[in-house]
Amino acid sequence: MTQLLTAKQMRDSDARAIGGNEEKSRELMYLASLGVYNNVKWHGKIAVVVGKGNNGGDGYSLALILKENNLDCDIIAPLGEPKKDSTAYYYFIITRNEFQHKYNRSRMKDAAPKQII
């Protein structure tokens, strides 16, 4: 496997893109999740394992997209509830079954590639 970026380089890139803005952080999470959703052929049982940080937010956001598209999934959170506001945003949407949120698929439909692998 070829490493494109180190973990530090990716964190620095995220920090520059977000600039401390929670709104941008949530949008970036949604776009990352939408990219995953659009590039996987979903079938069978689906489980999303989430952590407490930003990667957990990506996972909760992906679970939200799956549920919005009538794909049932289990969310596994071995570390407990999220510790970051941006991650908690998607956590609370999922746990309250409130699927009307600012970053819905219809608003972001052209944001990520539609390639199926």
Image (cartoon, rainbow, N blue to C red):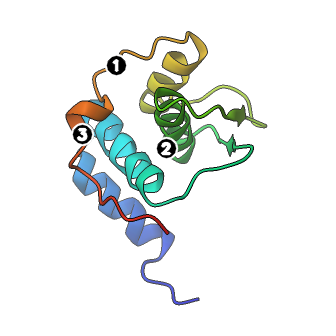
Q: What residue type is labelled 2?
A: Asp
Per the image, the residue denoted by label 3 is: 108
Q: Are marks 2 and 3 in contact (CB under 8 Å)?
A: no
Look at the picture and state if 21 lies above or below 38: above
Look at the picture and state if 31 lies above or below 72: below
Q: Quadrant of residue 35?
A: bottom left
Q: How far is disc 1 from disc 3 in space, using C-alphas?
A: 12 Å
Q: What residue type is labelled 3?
A: Met
Q: How far is disc 2 from disc 3 in space, using C-alphas?
A: 15 Å
Residue 85, given in percent of the width and then of the height, sits at 44, 26
Residue 65, given in percent of the width and then of the height, sits at 46, 35
Number of residue marks: 3
Q: In which quarter of the image is residue 101?
A: top left
Q: In which quarter of the image is the N terminus?
A: bottom right
| Residue shown at 26% from the left, 46% from the top | 18
Left or right, 74 with reference to 37: right
Extreme residue toward the right, this view: 78
Per the image, the residue denoted by label 1 is: 101
- Looking at the image, is mark 1 or mark 3 earlier in the sequence? 1
- Looking at the image, is mark 2 or mark 1 earlier in the sequence? 2
Q: What element carries label 2?
A: helix
Q: Which mark is residue 36?
A: none
Q: Residue 54 or 70: which is nearer the viewer?
A: 70
Q: What residue type is labelled 1?
A: His
| Residue shown at 65% from the left, 42% from the top | 51
Q: Residue 27 or 117: which is nearer the viewer?
A: 117
- Looking at the image, is mark 2 or mark 3 earlier in the sequence? 2
Residue 29, given in percent of the width and then of the height, sits at 39, 43
Q: Residue 58 carries which label?
A: 2
Residue 86, given in percent of the width and then of the height, sits at 42, 31
Q: What element carries label 3?
A: helix
